[in-house]
């Protein structure tokens, strides 16, 4: 029994160390959101819990920011973010952003169009299936992840 507890303690310490190392290496994310949007604030909290440092900007002109950053309006949601050269649109899970930053595919960024129930920041008593899309430079999309 003692060896099992030691193994569990060692595993837990290793997981904490790995999580801390990963979180320490995450870049800062800038988020533009409507000041009255509650789900945007919940999404920011989701990113912070994953280890990202987030700088939030309240604006009534999220669509103008989206356009300036090169994300087509048809993928628009309630907030737009910028991280390490990529645009993040909507309720994209932090794990998808981390994967994007690790794999570094060519493209404008990721989008979760709309506001699907069950996505980060849109927690509900039920979840809708949704996709995270990788948007390329021509504005076309491909499925990056399914949830």
Image (tube, rainbow, N blue to C red):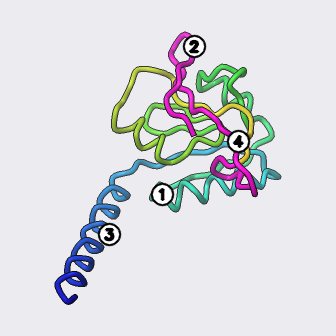
Name the spot of residue 58 as percent of width and height, x first: 73, 48
Say which label, 3 or 4, has the lower sequence index. 3
Q: Residues within 10 Å of mark 1 (few under 14, many from 20)?
A: some
**x 47%, y 54%: residue:** 52
Say which label, 1 or 4, has the lower sequence index. 1
Relative side of 52 to 128, left or right: left
**x 34%, y 32%: residue:** 103
> Between marks 2 and 3, how big is the CA–CA gap?
39 Å
Say which label, 2 or 4, has the lower sequence index. 4
> Between marks 3 and 1, how big is the CA–CA gap?
13 Å
Q: Say whether marks 2 and 4 touch (CB < 8 Å).
A: no
Q: Which residue is mark 4?
A: 128
Say which label, 2 or 3, has the lower sequence index. 3
Q: Start and end of the magenta stretch?
A: 118-147
Q: Residues within 10 Å of mark 2 (few under 14, many from 20)?
A: few
> Between marks 3 and 4, how big is the CA–CA gap?
31 Å
* The stretch drawn in magenta includes residue 128: yes
Q: Residues within 10 Å of mark 3 (few under 14, many from 20)?
A: few
Q: Which residue is mark 1?
A: 50
* Majority secondary structure of magenta residues: loop
Q: Which residue is mark 2?
A: 140
Q: Nearer the viewer, mark 2 or mark 4?
A: 4
Query: Residue 16 shows which numbered tag?
Result: 3
Above or below: residue 41 compared with residue 113: below
């Amino acid at each position: 029994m003692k060896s099992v507890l030691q193994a569990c303690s060692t595993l837990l310490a290793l997981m904490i160390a790995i999580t801390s190392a990963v979180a320490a290496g995450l870049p800062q994310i800038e988020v533009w959101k409507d000041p009255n949007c509650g789900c945007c604030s919940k999404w920011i909290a989701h990113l912070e819990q994953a280890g990202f440092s987030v700088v939030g900007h309240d604006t009534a002109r999220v669509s103008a920011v989206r356009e300036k950053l090169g994300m087509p309006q048809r993928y628009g949601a309630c907030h737009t973010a910028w991280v390490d050269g990529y645009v993040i649109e909507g309720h994209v899970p932090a794990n998808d952003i981390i994967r994007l930053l690790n794999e570094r595919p060519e493209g404008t960024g990721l989008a979760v169009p709309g506001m699907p129930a069950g996505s980060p920041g849109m927690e509900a008593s039920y979840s809708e299936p949704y996709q995270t899309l990788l948007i390329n430079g021509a504005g076309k999309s491909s499925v990056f992840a399914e949830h």
